[in-house]
Image (cartoon, rainbow, N blue to C red):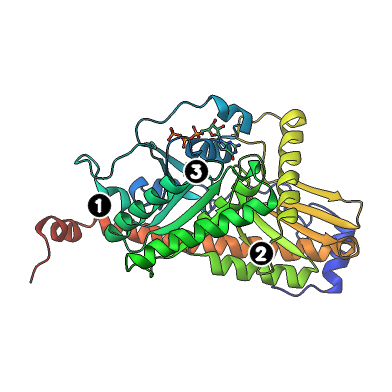
Amino acid sequence: MASYTQEDDKHYREYGPGCEIGSFPKDFVYGPDDPDQDISLIFAPDQKPKILLMGLRRSGKSSIQKVVFHKMTPNETLFLESTNKIESENISNSSFVQFKILDFPGQIDFFEPSFDSEKIFGGHGALVFVIDAQDDYMEALNRLHQTVLRAHKVNPHLRFEVFIHKVDGLSDDTKIVTQRDIHQRANDELVDAGMEQIHLSFYLTSIYDHSIFEAFSKVVQKLIPQLPTLENLLNLFISNSGIEKAFLFDVLSKIYIATDSSAVDMQSYELCCEMIDVVIDISDIYGKDEGTQVPFDKDSSSIIKLNNATVLYLREVSRYLALVCILREESFDKQGLIDYNFLCFRRAIQDVFDVRKLQLQQLTNSLSSPLLQNSHSNGPTT
Ligand SMILES: Nc1nc2c(ncn2[C@@H]2O[C@H](COP(=O)(O)OP(=O)(O)OP(=O)(O)O)[C@@H](O)[C@H]2O)c(=O)[nH]1
């Protein structure tokens, strides 16, 4: 992170917003290397990582997808109809949040000849298995076991994420007991089958609070190869700016794609989510209608001072990415320093995007090269 001198501070205070240090120049435009500009064109749908949503009927799969990615309110999910065929959707919110999500009907039968396991479980991605915690979960555990064994056989690199869902109906004690029981039974069955090397991650979730967004954030983060770099950049940024916690958010879904390495507490995450809601709602109601999917652009920023001497600070990073920070009020006295460091952080993120774009371009070129196509169609030569 570039060091910040007294002179920089003076410059910032003299010229205020609009000067080079501290805020983007007013005439800032997305250049050709805008991270979000054409990456979705480079990223062919079948190269995208995928998230498979599986589980018994009525466990809550479609509700999760609708609440996280379509802003559906939890109560509206009461009227969702049962899914009767595999529904696939491309999520391309920002360069880092690029994946295909597949919602499976609860009654799907893996042993049907029409079920192409190689195609479904193959590739880079995660399988999210949803268990209704308000129901008897023995059948769900049985199905989880079969699904995991089948999927692992086809693709040993697939990640397994288990959502112990609808926990809003359980007391705190029951939540813990249920999680322990499901965890124990699922792992015991794997051990009995001689597959103890398969790792299952468990999350307690509900669409009625932020737990579903938090859990989905963790699932998505595991699919982002640049995660350690993003985390390092955030660590550098906060330690040089007197910030306590920073989240890099996908504004459309409120998934956080990275945070610094200090522990995440649910309350901080909720506060940051609520800040995004406030900013988007106010801009939506009172801002200029520019026909964008969400009212969020290069000028979007917000400062909220809380009554416990804490400040929430939001800045736009790229089209649908925002940095939301939590800091002590006294640290915010050096806003010039924070803003300068933010600019450095933003540039570094841009560099990460550029490298990613280049890699994808090389990948696409190599896939479309005639030599490779030949070798694919003819099989390996000896
Ligand atoms: N209490 C509670 N109910 C939920 C939650 N998530 C989903 N539901 C309810 O569960 C019911 C079934 O949800 P769906 O999303 O249709 O379930 P599904 O797994 O997609 O069902 P199929 O399409 O039949 O496989 C709906 O009435 C939802 O409102 C939750 O977190 N808590």
Q: Residue at x 56, y 69 (%)?
A: 229
Do callouts 2 and 1 mark residues in contact (Cβ within 8 Å)? no
Instruction: Work out whether mark 1 precedes mark 3 in sequence or the reverse, and give the earlier one.
Output: 1
Mark in the foreground, 2 or 1: 1
Secondary structure under the numbered disc 1 in the rendered image = helix
Q: Earlier in the sequence, mark 2 or mark 1?
A: 1
Task: Say left or right for 128 vs 94.
Answer: left
Q: Secondary structure at mark 2?
A: helix
Amino acid, disc 2: Phe
The residues tagged by marks 1 and 3 sit, at their Cα atoms, a distance apart of: 31 Å
- Residue 87 % position (x, y): 39, 35
Q: CA distance from mark 2 to mark 1?
A: 41 Å
Residue at mark 3 to residue at mark 2: CA–CA distance: 48 Å
Q: Total of numbered circles in the picture?
A: 3
Local packing at callout 2 (Cα closer than 10 Å; few below 14, some 14-19, many 20+) is many
Residue found 67% across the figure and 70% down from its top? 235
User: What's the amino acid at mark 1?
Assistant: Glu
Q: Position of residue 181 (x, y in %)?
A: 53, 57
Residue at the outermost left position: 382
Q: Nearer the viewer, mark 1 or mark 3?
A: 3
Which label is found at residue 345?
2
Q: Is residue 247 left or right of residue 220?
A: right
For residue 118, the mark is: 1
The picture quadrant where one finds residue 188 is bottom left
Provide the residue designation for mark 3. 136
- For badge 3, the amino acid type reads Asp
Q: Looking at the picture, tell me which residue is in the foreground, 177 or 207.
A: 177
Q: Is disc 3 in contact with disc 2, using a CB cutoff of under 8 Å?
A: no
